[in-house]
Image: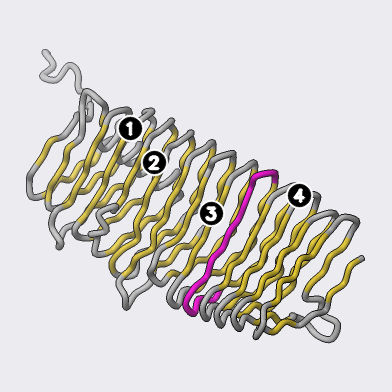
Amino acid sequence: MKRLFPCLSFQPRCVFAAVSSLSLLTPAWGAGLTGSETDPIGLATDSVTLEGGAAPGVWIQSGSHTIDALSDSGTLSVSGSPGISVTGDGSLLMVNSAGSLSLSGTSAALSVSALGASVFVNDQESASTVSVTGNIDVTGSQSIAYLTLTGRSPILRGNAAARGGGSVYLISTPDTDSKSTVSGGLSAIGADSILDLSGSGRTAFEGALTAADGGKVHIAAGDTSSFTVTSGLATGTGSEIESDARGTTELSGNLRAELGAAASENLYESSAGTGALSASGTGSVIRLGISGKAGFTGTVTAESGADAEVTLTDTGVIEGTGTGSSLVFQSTGAGSTLDLDIGTGTAATLSLIHI
């Protein structure tokens, strides 16, 4: 008997579309949508669903590409393993939705492993809600992932990491009566690697901060945000963690700098910080800056040749934690220094010890 289909294969192709909706589900050995310089993706529909299963939902091998869901009642949904994978040097992908935007992945929601590649998710800030489930990983010099959390109660559940000179920018601008939720660790590993979480909107963050081998992590909160740092460690020369709080933000958790790294906490306006700030080792520095009506409750410690710098301006307040002989400022070990700049009108509990 002659076979009607002697060979059956599936190969995702480039897409240029302007239709009402597109749903693409692929077998485990494929990719939901594959783009290259010779096969560019230019997708614009009311709704988009791309499911890669055990493969990427979107795989960018080279070139520049756009995926847009145009209807404010539509959905842009991408999932796979990872949800989006960018492997081509110099590639560009822009993903936007006028309605809801969902990105998820089992290995990662977004993975960039290339040099000089760029991924922009919701850079038009038009999505009515954003949901990202899975890690965001960027590896490669000058590669960037940019994610904007907009709309009603946007959420990111997963770790975000920049490595090898890559950068991750998380921008929080939810609706004024809503807040963004970011749950997961933030890390920058390697020289010129940057992880930045900031924005003008209300944000609830909980996770660890890690900067190593020259990487830099920056978090900034405004309005009535709450940031809970489960642990904060910067290690190695050139590594840095910087946390900024404005409005009535509550910033809690410990920051530590080791082996020549730096860590700082800056409190402005009416924000409040709590925790233990410390630095250890020659060349390491911990900084605390308080201005406006901000206040800090905790300890500041320099050890083993490290430096601590504390600056109060306006009516800033520092108080100790614990009971009785709680030490607010500590400088221990040969070569350790503590620089206090206490401005007029400020208040500090000065239990200073140098050993």
Residue corresponding to mark 1:
91
Which span is picked out in magenta?
236-250
The quarter holding residue 41 reads top left
Instruction: Tell me if label 4 and label 1 are in contact, CB under 8 Å.
Output: no
Secondary structure found at label 2: loop
Quadrant housing the N terminus: top left
| Amino acid type at image mark 4 | Gly
Q: Could you say whether the residue bearing mark 3 is in a helix, strand or loop?
A: strand
Specify the quadrant of the image occupied by residue 180. bottom left
Disc on the earlier residue, 3 or 1 = 1
Q: Position of residue 157 (x, y in %)?
A: 44, 59
**Dot 1, how many residues are within 10 Å of its Cα: few (below 14), some (14-19), or many (20+)?**
many
Residue positioned 12% across, 52% down in the render: 46
Query: Which label belongs to residue 186?
Result: 3
Task: Please provide percent x and percent y for residue 231.
Answer: 64, 61
Depicted 226 relative to depicted 47: above or below? below
Q: Position of residue 45 (x, y in %)?
A: 12, 48
Task: Report, in whole angstroms, how far the alpha carbon at label 3 lies from the one at label 1.
Answer: 24 Å
Q: From mark 4 to mark 1, how far is it between C-alphas? A: 39 Å
The residue at the far front in this view is 344
Numbered tag placed on residue 81 in the rendering? 2
Tell me, yes or no, whether the highlighted magenta stretch contains residue 279: no
Placement of the C terminus among the 4 image quadrants = bottom right
Which of the marked residues, 2 or 3, is nearer the chain's N terminus?
2
Contact, mark 3 vs mark 1 (Cβ under 8 Å): no
Q: Which residue is mark 4?
A: 283
Examine the structure image and report whether residue 242 is included in the region drawn in magenta. yes
